[in-house]
């Protein structure tokens, strides 16, 4: 598994919370984890290069990389896609609020 950093909320902790909610032990779920320290495009590059079989990126991250030409559309898939019909972004977890500035 490739991910940005162990304390990154959207790049690791949300996904591990999803595993825990599904009854898995997230600490032992993956054979190995490679923290790239940068979410995009490093995690996706790690997966495309074959260094990791899967990666964790933020919601809408794959769509952004596809629209910017970093990844050809259809090259990667979203595991256990939870986005319903008509959703603008594919995702494997529930939705969480973004940064709030007051």
Image (cartoon, rainbow, N blue to C red):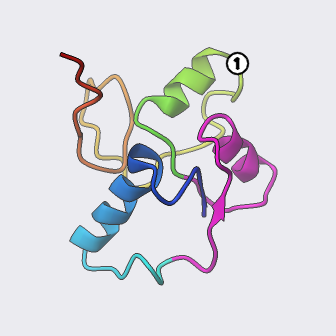
Q: How many marks?
A: 1
Who is closer to the viewer here, 79 or 34? 34
Q: Residue at x 65, y 46 (%)?
A: 43
Could you tell whether 64 is left or right of 84 in the image? right
- Mark 1: which secondary structure? loop
User: Against 7, is 89 above or below?
Assistant: above
Could you tell whether 97 is left or right of 5 in the image? left
Q: Residue at x 61, y 25 (%)?
A: 65
Q: Which residue is mark 1?
A: 69
Q: Where's the C terminus, which quadrant? A: top left
Could you tell whether 94 is left or right of 16 in the image? left
Q: Where's the N terminus, which quadrant? A: bottom right
Residue extending furthest toward the right: 49
The image position of residue 34, as x and y in percent, is 67, 63
Q: Quadrant of residue 14?
A: bottom left
Q: Residue at x 64, y 41 (%)?
A: 38
Q: Residue at x 22, y 69 (%)?
A: 21
Magenta segment: 30-55
């Amino acid at each position: 598994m490739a991910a940005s950093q162990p304390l990154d909320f959207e790049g690791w902790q949300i996904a591990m919370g999803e595993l825990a909610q599904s009854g898995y032990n997230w600490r032992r779920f993956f054979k190995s984890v490679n923290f790239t320290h940068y979410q995009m495009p490093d995690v996706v590059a790690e997966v495309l290069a074959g260094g990791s079989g899967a990666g964790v990126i933020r919601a809408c991250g794959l769509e952004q990389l596809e629209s910017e030409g970093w990844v050809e559309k259809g090259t990667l898939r979203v595991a256990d896609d939870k986005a319903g019909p008509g959703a603008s972004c594919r995702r494997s977890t529930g939705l969480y609020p973004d940064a709030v500035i007051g």
